[in-house]
Image: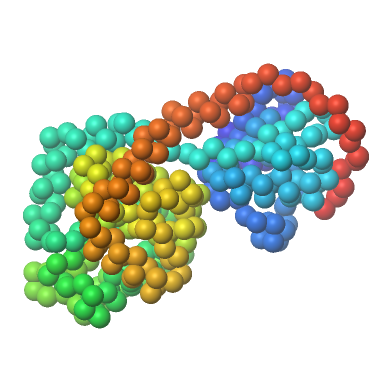
Amino acid sequence: MQDYQLQLVPAMLRKLRPDLRIGFFLHIPFPPRELFAQLPWRRQILEGLIGADLVGFQLPGAAQNFVRLIRERVGHKTHRDLIYLPDGRTVIAKAYPISIDAAAFEELARSESVVARCKEIRESLGNPRHLLLGIDRLDYTKGLRQRLRAFGELLRDGSLDVDDAVFVQVATPSRERVGQYRILRDDIDRLVGRLNGDIGRIGQQPITYLHASYPREEMAALYRAADVMVVTPLRDGMNLVAKEYVACRHDDAGALVLSEFAGAAAELRQAYRVNPYDINGMKDALLDAINAEPRENARRMRSMRKHVLEHDIEHWATTFLDDLTAPREPHDKKMRPAKAS
């Protein structure tokens, strides 16, 4: 089972089929104790999850939060990543950072059609010296306002020239029936229009905003075309766009500007890390990525590519399933009755 919609299901399955080996993976961030304690259904969620034999998270800190909450809120005995239940089961809570089919993305990026499309994209934008790219779902957690504002300020204060720098932002439609998402779309539309109107010139718009979904081939061409990939979520479980960009850069060119609040930041340590709440810091990071020597960016990209290619989606799935299916003996810990909280 996967993701937050099904957090109660492991316990339901356990009640119906106690003989099953059950695994659960959570794709979103697991909150710290202070936030989790605000939930009216905090105990139900915790007890739902420990119906599984293995609970996977994106980051070690999330797994630690979960184990600590089980100890404090439910009262079960724990040790490191282990939770001991009264029925003799031992639940494991560990981090399994999710990934992508890195080899497939690299192969796609090397294809003649993608290389040709990459050239077309840059030509259609006027062959700018610096092409910055953002690709996200249109979601309030993705930090679109902050990155567009930072880019606009760099143009306004003269740190970047509108003739040299272009920002392409792809915002994939998301939850369009939800009122807050429609409001967000309107806000981004107005922000892009204002920046293009204030800074742009005839035939030269600094921001190309695309509210649409695109096939993988087009995404790979955009990744190949971009000099700087800007991934600045306010919070994200992982963010696979960052890994896709790295996988496509077999030329070791390009730079990744990455929010420290994305799970991918724990793995892609050679990215230009930013705090998306700090607009001035984001501006500095964008300039660092743009102005870095090609040799420096190549060094960073090689390191990130090595990690992404070695820790791909097959590695993620195999590691999780190996841990799930490994033989286990019932524990013999003496247990106190679980407390209510």
Residue 97 in sight: yes
Residue 10 in sight: no
Q: Nearer the viewer, residue 41 or 166?
A: 166
Q: Is residue 313 left or right of residue 196?
A: right
| Residue 25 point in image, percent of width and height | 57, 37
Q: Residue at x 62, y 30 (%)?
A: 23
Q: Is residue 254 left or right of residue 11?
A: left
Identify the image quadrant of residue 194: bottom left
Q: Is residue 233 left or right of residue 168?
A: right
Q: Residue at x 10, y 42 (%)?
A: 116
| Residue 229 point in image, percent of width and height | 30, 55
Identify the image quadrant of residue 292: bottom left
User: Does 206 sit above or below residue 31?
Assistant: below
Q: Residue at x 83, y 45 (%)?
A: 75
Q: Nearer the viewer, residue 46 or 237?
A: 237
| Residue 82 point in image, percent of width and height | 72, 36
Q: Nearer the viewer, residue 80 or 15?
A: 80
Q: Residue at x 79, y 34 (%)?
A: 84
Q: Quadrant of the N terminus?
A: top right
